[in-house]
Amino acid sequence: MQTVPTGQPAASSVPGSHAPKSAGIRRITPAMLPTEATAERFAGGDITPGQALAALKAAAPRLGIAPRLIHAIDWLFRFTQPQDWQPGARPIVWPSSSMQAAELAVTEDQARRINRQLVERGLIVMRDSPNAKRYGRRDARGRIVEGYGFDLSPIGARIDEFRAAAEAYRADRATIARLRRRATIARNSLRQTWLTYQEQQIADPALPGLRAAAEAASAGLRSIEAAEALALATERLETVARTARQALEMALSHGPHGGSDSVEMSGRPGINAGHITTTTENLNPSDTVLASNECSRGQGRDDLDDDQAVARPANSTKPREDRGAVMRIRPDELIRIAPRLKPYLRRASPSWPEIVDAADWLRHDLGISKPLWGEACVTMGRERAAIAIAIVSSKPAEHFRTSPGGYFNGMVAKARDGALHLDRTIWGVRTAATRGHRPTHTQ
C-alpha cells in the first residue's frame, strides 16, 4: 500500500492538481446523457427482440443512422432473448471486447468508438460493473439476474418513434418512385416528339428552343433525392413535354412537311417582307391553325375594353377604337413597359392591329410557337394575347423556370381555365416600370 509522507496531502486533494485516471472509468460526453433518460422510459411489454430490431432497421435511412452502426446493433441482438423485453426485465447483453472486435472485424479501439456512437445516437446505454468487466448470469428460467454490458432498452423505448419514421420513409420513397415514373413518361414523350419531327422532316423554328428547354429541365433530375424538389423538377419537365407535343400536333396539321410556322419569315416589318399565310377550304373556323393565321392577319375576334359592361353583339358594325384602351392600357403605354416591341413597329403611335402584328414577330424571337400563339388568340383574344406576349418579353431571363415559351403556355392554360388575371399582371408590370424609371419634371 502506497503511503503519503507526513505533512504532504494526497495528489487528488491538492487544489488544481489532476488526479490520475482510474482504471475502468468511462468517459461520458454530453451527447450520451439523454440516452440514460430514454432507457429509463422502457418498461417492457408486448414486444419481441425481432420487432424492436426490425423497427430500428426500417427507420435507419430516415434517421441517418450509418450502416456500420446498424451492423453493430444487429450483432448485439444475437445475445438477447424474448424474456429480456418483458415487464420488469432489462435487455442487457455482455459480449467481451475482444469478441466484439473480432466479430465486427475492427480493432478494440474502433469497437469502443462504435459503442460511443451508439450511445450518442440514443440506441444503447453502457452498464458498467464495479471492476469494469462485462458479465452477467441468468436463473433457471433464463431471466437475467445480474448483467453488465450493453443495455438495449433505448431501442425498446423508441420503438413507436422508429415505426413512425419508417412509415414516413416508405411514404417518401413511394412519392419519389411515382415522380420518377412521371419523369420517365415525360422523357419518353419528348423522345417520341423529336423522332416524329425527324421522320416527318418538319422545319419548326420553335424546335431548338424546345430542345434547349427539355435539356435544361432534365439536367440533374436523376440526382434529386428530396421529394419536394423532385416534384418541382418533374412538373417542369412535363410542361416542356406538353408544349413540345402541342407544337408537333399543330405542325402535323399543316401537312407532313410543314412546321408549326407554315412558312419561313423573310425579314422584319418594313424590310420588303410581310406575313405569308395559307388557308384551307372547308376548314372549321374554330380550328387553331386558322385562328393562328387570322391572328397574324389581324382578322380575329374583336375584344372590348374591360370598362364596357355589355358585350358587343356579333353582328354589330360599331367602329373599333384601334388606339383606345384594352385591359385599361393603350398601345403607347404598352410599348413603354415592353420596349422589345419597338423594333417591330413602323411608327411611334401604333394601332392595336399593328401591336398584334408586332407581337407575332416578337413571339418568334421569344421561341413561342405559331400554334401556341394561335391558341392564345382564340382563348384570350388578339389584343390580350399581344399584351401577354409583351409582358413575357418584359421579364428577365432568370424569371423563367424553363423558357419564355413555357411561361406563355402557362398563361394560355390559365386563360382556358378562367384563372388568368391579366389586369393584375399589367398593374404589377406598370408599377415596376414606374419605380424603375421615375419621370422627370419639365417646364
Image: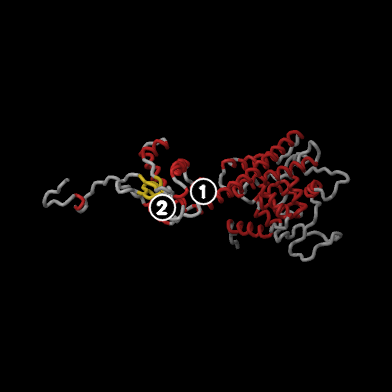
Residue at the spot 85% in from the left edge and 61% down from the top edge:
316
In this view, the residue in front, 186 or 167, is 167
Quadrant of res 38: bottom left
- What's the amino acid at mark 2? Thr
Disc 1 target residue = 51
Q: Secondary structure under badge 1?
A: helix
In this rendering, is residue 36 above or below 183? below
Q: Would you say 94 lies left or right of 381 here? A: left
- Give the Cα distance between marks 1 and 2: 20 Å
How far across and down, in percent of the image, does residue 381 sit?
76, 54
Q: Which comes sooner in the sequence, label 1 or label 2?
A: 2
Is residue 420 something that shows in the picture?
A: yes
Q: Nearer the viewer, mark 1 or mark 2?
A: 1
How far across and down, in percent of the image, does residue 157 sit?
46, 54
Is residue 61 something that shows in the picture?
A: no
In the image, which disc is placed on residue 223? Answer: none
Disc 2 target residue = 35
How far across and down, in percent of the image, does residue 176 sit?
60, 46
Quadrant of res 1: top left
